[in-house]
Image (cartoon, rainbow, N blue to C red):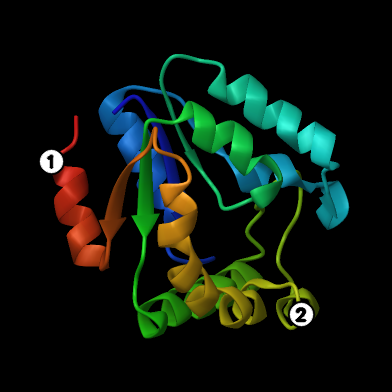
Amino acid sequence: MRRVIVIGTTGSGKTTLARDLAERLGVPHGEQDAWNHQPGWQAASTEQFRAAVRAFTAGPAWVMDGNYSKARDVGWARADTLVWLDYPGPVVFWRVLSRTVRRVVTRQELWNGNRETLRGAIRADSPVPWFFRTHWRRRREMPALAATFPNLTVVRLRSPAHARAWLARQG
């Protein structure tokens, strides 16, 4: 396990797990949200985003988190392991809701100067509505999608406790 993709529904804890795993393995961590969310919440162009993924995954060892389909063919093809945070809906909903509230209240800077706002938190593409649009669909579709990348060893973690136990065994 030297080139790892960490995926899961928005708010599931991809970045936290990926950062911790990268530290344990002693490899770089890449966060796709940081490459996609440009200043003013502008999305990176597909080519700009793909170039960032290509550059990061060109290395011999890394951990990258994110679900972006616009460069899945690059990252997943170069990875050897896919870690899927496949948590129950109520667990992820609570996480994304509490994270969103915390970020709005504290005005935490996320990527490239962006901050979540109360107005932004209720937009259709914000994390809470996004969770409802994607969580159950991704749970249905992910096994077949992962199977199209035979290079990947899939690690499916079904609860935060399962993820903590798995992480403790790494590195």
Label drawn at residue 124: 2
Q: Is residue 30 visible?
A: no
Q: Position of residue 50 (x, y in %)?
A: 73, 33
In this rendering, the answer to whether 168 lies above or below 61 is below
Q: Residue at x 74, y 72 (%)?
A: 125
Whether residue 16 sits left or right of residue 45 in the image: it is left
Q: Which residue is mark 1?
A: 169
For the residue marked with disc 1, what is the amino acid? Answer: Arg
Q: Crowdedness of circle 1 by 10 Å Cα count: few (<14), some, many (20+)?
A: few
In this rendering, the answer to whether 27 lies above or below 39 is above
Give me the C-alpha separation between circle 1 and circle 2: 38 Å
- Front residue of 44/94: it is 44
Q: Position of residue 3 (x, y in %)?
A: 40, 28
Nearer-N-terminus badge (1/2): 2
Label drawn at residue 87: none
Whether residue 84 sits left or right of residue 167 in the image: it is right
Quadrant housing residue 90: bottom left
Q: Residue at x 32, y 47 (%)?
A: 154
Q: Position of residue 75 (x, y in %)?
A: 56, 34
Whether residue 31 sits left or right of residue 80 in the image: it is right
